[in-house]
Amino acid sequence: MNADRATVRDVAARAGVSPSTVSRVIKGDYPVAQSTRTRVLRAMRELDYVLNVHARALSGASTKMVAFVLDDVTGPSFAYVAKGVEQQATAEGRLCMVCATNGDPARELAVVEAMREQRADAVILVGGGALDDAYRERMSHFAHALDKAGSRLVLCGRPPLGDDVPTTVVEYDNEGGAYAMTSHLLSQGHRNIALIGADHPGQASTTKLDRVRGFVRAHESFGVPYDPDLIVPAGFGRADGHTAARRLITLGARFTAVFAATDMVAIGVLAALREAGLRVPEDVSLAGYDDIPFAADLSPGLTTVRIPTEELGRTAVRLALDRRQPQHVVLGTHIVVRGSVGPATPR
Amino acid sequence: MNADRATVRDVAARAGVSPSTVSRVIKGDYPVAQSTRTRVLRAMRELDYVLNVHARALSGASTKMVAFVLDDVTGPSFAYVAKGVEQQATAEGRLCMVCATNGDPARELAVVEAMREQRADAVILVGGGALDDAYRERMSHFAHALDKAGSRLVLCGRPPLGDDVPTTVVEYDNEGGAYAMTSHLLSQGHRNIALIGADHPGQASTTKLDRVRGFVRAHESFGVPYDPDLIVPAGFGRADGHTAARRLITLGARFTAVFAATDMVAIGVLAALREAGLRVPEDVSLAGYDDIPFAADLSPGLTTVRIPTEELGRTAVRLALDRRQPQHVVLGTHIVVRGSVGPATPR
DNA sequence: CATTCGGTAGACATCGGTTTCTACGCTAGA
DNA sequence: TCTAGCGTAGAAACCGATGTCTACCGAATG
């Protein structure tokens, strides 16, 4: 009785054939006599044979693995991208690795390196993404290295690294969503809209920049001036929204609507408004961005911008594994109207 | 110029040493002269050498991988378990694979099989878990097979398979949480408490059974009879809670509090109560289970049972990788009091 | 001066499938 | 009858890193 696993050789011995034949039965791409195949399959069952993917990978086969790198597994929208990735990976017969970076660029680079060691078929980076040059250069290097090894770097919901860098890019129309939502607010008569969650000066994020850009462009389209003081920098979390909104209220800023840069921020803003005795949407309208699952369960339901999270993940995997597809795609966004936005009321 | 990756041999050639020496530099557990080491490291850098984990795994080393199997990546509590797993895996120098089963036992078995092929250090199963014998037997088989191969099957938040099956079990006190919450409701004077989200007849789930058990035991402790008609079967989702609550209301059932089997159910119940013009907690008190992140953001905040999700994940990995630790642990649960439960008011 | 030992490095087998390349047995056509 | 051709199966090399076993060099010891 052996405590180790059965190998191809063991199976071969038991079935009275050569290892090559067993291998051919497993892969099934080479003619094997019916009787032989049956004997081999029986031997495999009897020995509880399990393939060793490492041995297979070593002798040239693909690893059938896709790697997925994100900031935080519990981020409400990231989880949906992860779901899309996992679904598509499964559909394409791939397994799925997940690594969280907690927003640390150094950790992200380390993780991508680990994926190179693993020889993953594709490495999918989601969200965020630092903008400094050293980082971009290192990432470009990885992209080239992965490409040379027949693998692929995928940027999902983040901007491209450059035209000469071999990557697959799946974005969504961040600016368009912000434009649409701002237009919606303007068309409801709002003329003093606070944008909470713009950039902290210094630490630029393209996601935020695009949302601010859409906000500004909508104002320009409507010929409505915007108050720069109402564009307030903040993080992307609930607490960020809460403190930013409270400060705005304390300062006595004049606004009839708040456009939060994310739904999490919106939830924080909502709490701050409530604490200040302001009703939504009667006194102040509130809009978010992301359409996280709970947006519908707030009271009132949050009017927000839906981003095609699952599709983002699925597309990333699909394109990375089939290079005949276009390798740069921008998915659409659209606003979801619920109860948190109403017509502007003078205050 | 070669499009393939550099191997140990390539590095060795460039550094003018043997492959063995390069390997020793990489592992660092064998004395190598300082000058040699320097030359090898330089050659590695110059060739952009990347280790091949498959080759390493093949020659006996651990795969440094942990697999994580769950129903659905987007499940609010699962995501936190995933976070805990990912954190601890990273802390222990492991990578993390994730597979979703969408609640399909067949798929779960297929996934575990895939993990055997991958030679993962540990395979962690979270949530749900079928109860029928065929399934349990197959899973026991996997547990033994993994064990024989030096790996480990971990049951996280699900019941053990049996004493003779080599598994690591990390549970939380499901029944205790239900007991505590029911006691809380009873102590607030509620005498007609509806439990929404008990079992559908036929498809038994231990999670649900335990929660019902705690509910019943609390009533017995308080010497309060409970109305079996108020224990209503339902799924674990928002929609399930919504329809179940609406039916209860339509039927004219008499209750002053609802204990929802999950927070998602509670959210559905909340919507149904609102639609019926019932205020929470003035007319009806509402309690949930799980303490998902948004429980605090509902209005009123949801009183619920907190389960130590992240710790569950971390513990699973920790115990699986260190067998000197106890291999069966039950983590505690406790209630979180927010605004959705008030004193009973006669109706 | 011979011998041994410590420090270091190379040769080679090994892990478990895959994949040529070769070869067998048999039938069909020249 | 001889051989070409097909279907099937085996032998052996290979993927890339590891580890064992051996061997070398210089220094220290008897």
Image (cartoon, coloured by chain):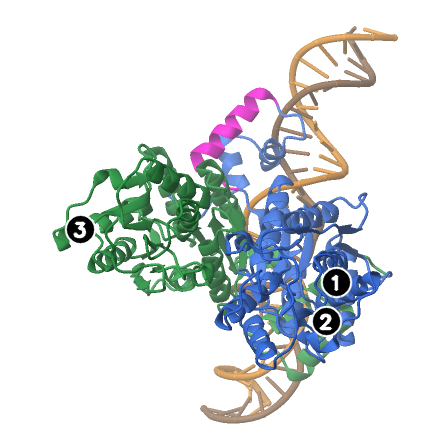
Chain colours: A green, B blue, C brown, D orange
Query: Mark 1 highlights which residue?
Result: A6
What amino acid type is highlighted by mark number 3? His
Q: Are marks 3 and 2 on the same chain?
A: yes
Q: Sequence-wise, which precedes: disc 2 or disc 1?
A: 1
Res A249 label: none
Q: Name the residue at 74% across, 47% down.
A: B319
Q: Residues within 10 Å of mark 2 (few under 14, many from 20)?
A: many
Query: Mark 2 highlights which residue?
Result: A44
Residue A54 placed where, x, y %? 61, 55
Residue B328 placed where, x, y %? 80, 52
Give the magenta range. Answer: B33-50
Disc 2 and disc 1: Cα gap in Å?
A: 8 Å
Q: Name the residue at 52% across, 54% down.
A: B294
- Where is B172 relative to A203, above or below? below
Pinpoint the chain carrying mark 2: A
Disc 1 and disc 3: Cα gap in Å?
A: 69 Å
Pinpoint the chain carrying mark 3: A
Q: Name the residue at 51% across, 56% down.
A: B298
**Of A88 and B150, the residue lying toward us:** A88
- Where is A134 relative to B80, above or below? above
Q: Are marks 3 and 2 in contact (CB under 8 Å)?
A: no
Pinpoint the chain carrying mark 1: A
Query: Is any atom of residue A306 visible in this view?
Result: no
Query: Mark 3 highlights which residue?
Result: A219
